[in-house]
Image: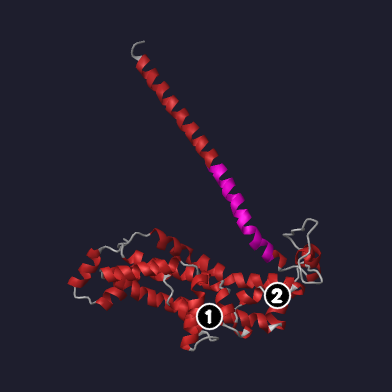
Amino acid sequence: MSRRQPVRSVEREMSVLRQRKKRKKFWAGIRVAIATCIAACFAFLFLTPIILTISNSFMASSEISANYGTVFSTTDTGGKVYIAEKVNLKFIPDMVSFSQYATVLFKSPDYLLKFWNSVILVGPIVLFQLLVASLASYGFARYRGRIREIIFFSYIILMLMPYQVTLVPNYLVADWLGVLDTKWAIWLPGIFSPFAVFLLTKFMRRIPTGVIEAAQIDGAGELQIYRLICMPLCKGALCSAAILVFIDYWNMVEQPLILLKDPEMHPLSVFLSKINQGEVGLAFAVATIYMVPSLLVFLYGEEYLIDGITYQGGIKG
């Protein structure tokens, strides 16, 4: 009996440990399920406007007017009408109609013209801002000094300022340069924006100095270090900056309204706000088309965006 007692005590302890593990797994599963439900609720709330926009773009104009007519109706003096009844939010149209897309893509060229205006305005800003920011960031990361730190601090101050604060100085400078009412009035402030410089500088400073010193020992010059070492290591940061800059300028409204007087040069983001009451269905279709580039850029660069935020510098194996 004395020999069996230690064995039984060990078995009891093992069973107690198993029960504790089961309880931990059970409560861990409960916590994961609760967190998943909460995240799903928030995801649904955030995705509801997008889902409504896409689904309503396939509705006929009569169905949209029946569901949302009170929202967009106005009085004789141009004021808004008080909504005394609930608005009928529909996620599934009664009858799928492609008439809105047919009008946008084939019958009315204004929408596509504004779309390509957005591409022409945003594309050069993203490309050349990354080029200028990568060169400036390399200089800030490689060479330290009081003057350079003051300049970099001024970059941070400018980045923290809302664009509305610098809109009047940009207008005056554009007028002085003679580029007002031209695409250069949008391109120049965007190309030399401080955001990408700040992001890439902080990233490049995390690159180990031993990597650069090894390249210098091998006889590499500054241009080779920039092109063959810093740029490949900063691929994630460059993609992150490109995504954020693209989304920021793709949705710009104030800059074209102030710096471009010709409505024919305005991007689609400005034109969307000018669609009148009788074109609500077209607004849903145009908004859906307008969302496609941003969604594609984000979905394609999601991995690079996360990598650019979490990567701490160094060489990956």
Residue 150 within the segment the image draws in magenta: no
Sort mark 1 into few (<14), some (14-19) or many (20+) by Cα contacts within 10 Å: many
Residue 303, position as x, y percentages in the image: 45, 62
Disc 1 element: helix
The stretch in magenta equals 32-54
Taking the image as drawn, is residue 152 in sight? yes
Quarter in which the N terminus is drawn: top left
Q: Can you tell which quarter of the image residue 93 is in?
A: bottom right
Nearer to me, 29 or 108: 108
Quarter in which the C terminus is drawn: bottom left
Q: Residue at 78% x, 67% y: name it.
A: 73
Nearer to me, 133 or 178: 178
Residue 259, position as x, y percentages in the image: 55, 81
Nearer to me, 205 or 58: 205
Q: Is residue 113 above or below residue 317?
A: below
**Type of residue at label 2?**
Ile
Q: Residue at 68% x, 75% y: name it.
A: 274
Look at the image and name its color scheme: secondary structure
Residue 106, position as x, y percentages in the image: 70, 82
Q: Which residue is mark 1?
A: 121
Q: Assess whether mark 2 and mark 1 are in contact (beta carbons under 8 angstroms).
A: no
Residue 47, numbered circle: none
70 left or right of 230? right
Q: Residue at 72% x, 73% y: name it.
A: 282
Q: Can you tell which quarter of the image residue 291 is in?
A: bottom right
Closer to the chain start, of discs 1 and 2, is: 1
Residue 275, numbered circle: 2
Q: Main secondary structure of the magenta part?
A: helix
| CA distance separating discs 1 and 2 | 21 Å
Q: Can you tell which quarter of the image residue 277 is in?
A: bottom right
